[in-house]
Amino acid sequence: RRPANFPVGRSKMPLTGSGGNRNFFAHAGEGADLCGGCTLATQFLPFVLDRCGRNMVFLHSGNRDMLGLWYRRKVTERKKLLQASSEGSRAQPFRYPENYLLKAAEELIMEIEIKRLFGTLADPINLRLYVFLNGQQEQFIDFHDLPAPVFRFLAQVKQLESAEKKKFWWPLVRRGFQWNKKEEADQDTLYRQAKNEIFQRLLTGQTIVPYFIVRDQRRVIGNWQILAFYLKEVREMTDERIQAIQQFADRLAEQIKAYDSGKKRLAQLEMAKSYARFRNVLLRMVHDRVANGAEEPLVYFEEYVNYLFPDSAAGWNETRDLIFFRLYEQLHPWLVEQGLTPVAEEDEEEAMEELEK
């Protein structure tokens, strides 16, 4: 009888090295000691492997339901791929693992919606993409993680798209693609061939708030509900701070519409490139409010210190972007009526002159 564990080399198990190179293995063995079950399972690995650049990728999750959905989907794709190969038609492989991982998450969420398995979203779902190479000259392995909060955020966006019959995700991520070629690219080509800054930021814990705002057109992508969910789930921002920023931006919007100085103040806020200048414009708006006899202050001390800019100048950019998102969302009808979309050059020049005073 063969023992439960027996030596296995690279011909049967990726990344284990050649049996002839005994220094590769522990105790100068002839291979890695693996059981028959593991070795057999590896033979079926190609059914769920994909190419990514010159490497191979393999998706894994701690959620067994997600694994089942993904593996069945990949087996179905392999059957179609065999037919396509006989007909001479094949899709290009993905070039960047980050794109592959986010696209896989989208497809899993679509499977959840089609099969109405919404109960699976109650548990945290994290995905890990293994990237490896098992070549003659080089062998390596790496991985990319999609955290559970990012998966929940994406699932929430997709559910809102279904409920409101609008597209939110694609208009957002399209802004992150880097495509320098002259010819236009469709959605599938961009996902497979172009690097995406939004995907990279989501996987490395960096903010994507600026991508929700189209500054030169004074408009937003999505709505406050989607942005608030991103802030709470992914950025771990408290409900109190999210609500405080929303209420402050709403007061700013009302003042901009109501006062003669509104257009100029909006342009000045947009031109402020530092925390000091941004704070200076807010101070001028406080003066405008006092001069017009407003009963309610523009901002309360506790609100400003604890929620709007709790770290003073540090991290002020994200708060500013959140304020602009809410401003543009609330002011959109007024901006269109006033002819203030896109940003007019004369508004920028006037704002810069005023800020220099």
Image (spheres, rainbow, N blue to C red):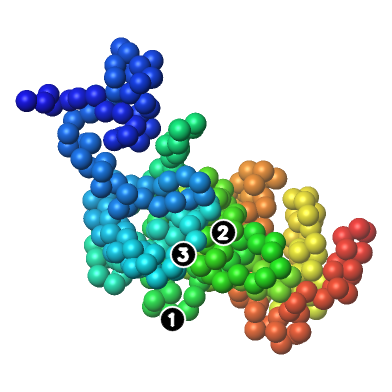
The nearer-to-camera label among 2 and 3 is 3
Q: Residue at x 31, y 70 (%)?
A: 113
Q: Is residue 129 visible?
A: no
Which percent across, then down, holds residue 220? 61, 71
Q: Residues within 10 Å of mark 1 (few under 14, many from 20)?
A: few
Quadrant in the picture for residue 104: bottom left
Q: Is residue 73 above or below residue 53?
A: below
Q: Quadrant of the N terminus?
A: top left
Disc 3 marks which amino acid?
Ala
Q: Residue lying farthest bottom?
A: 337
Dot 2: element: helix
The nearer-to-camera label among 2 and 1 is 2
Which percent across, then down, holds residue 92? 50, 61
- Residue occupied by mark 1: 165
Dot 3: element: loop
Q: Nearer the viewer, residue 25 or 340?
A: 25
Q: Left or right? Give the position of 113 relative to 153.
A: left
Q: Residue at x 32, y 52 (%)?
A: 48
Dot 1: element: loop
Q: Nearer the viewer, residue 260 or 142?
A: 142
Q: Is residue 130 above or below residue 76?
A: above
Between the C-alphas of marks 2 and 3, the distance is 11 Å
Q: Earlier in the sequence, mark 1 or mark 3?
A: 3
Disc number at residue 91? Answer: 3
- Residue occupied by mark 2: 193
